[in-house]
Image (spheres, rainbow, N blue to C red):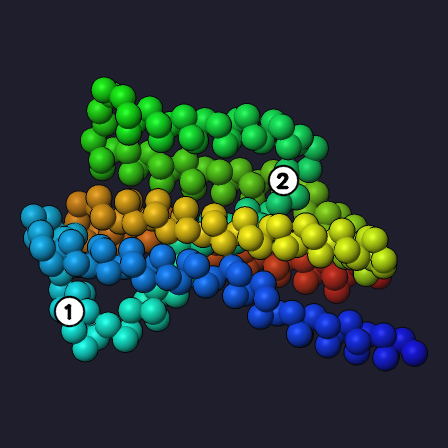
Amino acid sequence: MSDDKNKTLAEAADSKWWDFYLIRYAMGTVVGSLLVFFMLHLGMKSTSTETAKIFSDLYKLFGLGGYGLWILPLLGLSYCYLASAPILVIHACRSAFLGVKEKTMFFFIVIPAIFFVLIFNFSSISIPAYAASVLILLAIIVIQLLCIYLSIDNRRGYYKRLCDKRAGATGGSKEYVESYKHLREHGNAFMIVMMEIILTVILYNATSYMCLIAVIIAWISPAAYVWFVGSYLEKNFCEDQKL
């Protein structure tokens, strides 16, 4: 009986895997393709910087002016996944938000971000594009590092409680789980697009080849740490007899 129940749950999960991934990456792939083409095309039109020359060379390499357009969706999907690296960190270390009220997050994260964008786009305040890109990159990295650090002590307990609750979810509880998962996936799709736009601005304002490489490494480094997060959870699973 237990095996039949587990089989049914596994089949249900397998039948829905495409739902979440399609929602998550479909729009990001389309927008990512347009942004990649935008960067490479502008690089071809303007070779005023070393980075622009790199974009120009890539544009010619992939043949995006003609026969190579077929590869653009693949580049868009790859760029979409690359840009979503900070989201992976926030998701993996979301136990850092335990005890933080939603109103607090809204007033101290969402509103300041919108205010920052409006101030520097519609006011007389001017800031060099390169300096603004560096500040945005640093802010995104700092947020990720804080999530990693603040989740260290409660990450194990959080995942344990979450797994126990989900395993026992039936009826209304199961529908509750499905509801917040779908809401998060739709929000994830829009957050990926936002990250793609931000990364595009940062990359295009890189002043040299080495700067471009440094930006990409800095962008994905916190996400690479998620491998250790998964490994520590695996270690806890092996050592804890109650799991």
Task: State which tag comes first along the sequence, 2 or 1.
Answer: 1
Compared across the picture, whether 26 is left or right of 15 comes to left
Residue drawn where x is 17% and y is 49% of the image: 208
Which of these two is toward me, 118 or 2? Answer: 118
Which of these two is toward me, 20 or 54? Answer: 20
Circle 2 SS class = helix
Residue 156 visible within the image: no
Residue 203 visible within the image: yes
Q: What is the spatial separation of the Cα atoms under label 2 and label 1, in whole angstroms?
A: 46 Å
Q: Amino acid at mark 2?
A: Ala
> Disc 1 marks which residue?
65
Q: Does residue 132 lie above or below 243 as drawn?
A: above
Q: Position of residue 123 (x, y in %)?
A: 27, 21
Residue drawn where x is 66% and y is 43% of the image: 95
Q: Position of residue 130 (x, y in %)?
A: 22, 37
Residue drawn where x is 40% and y is 54% of the image: 83
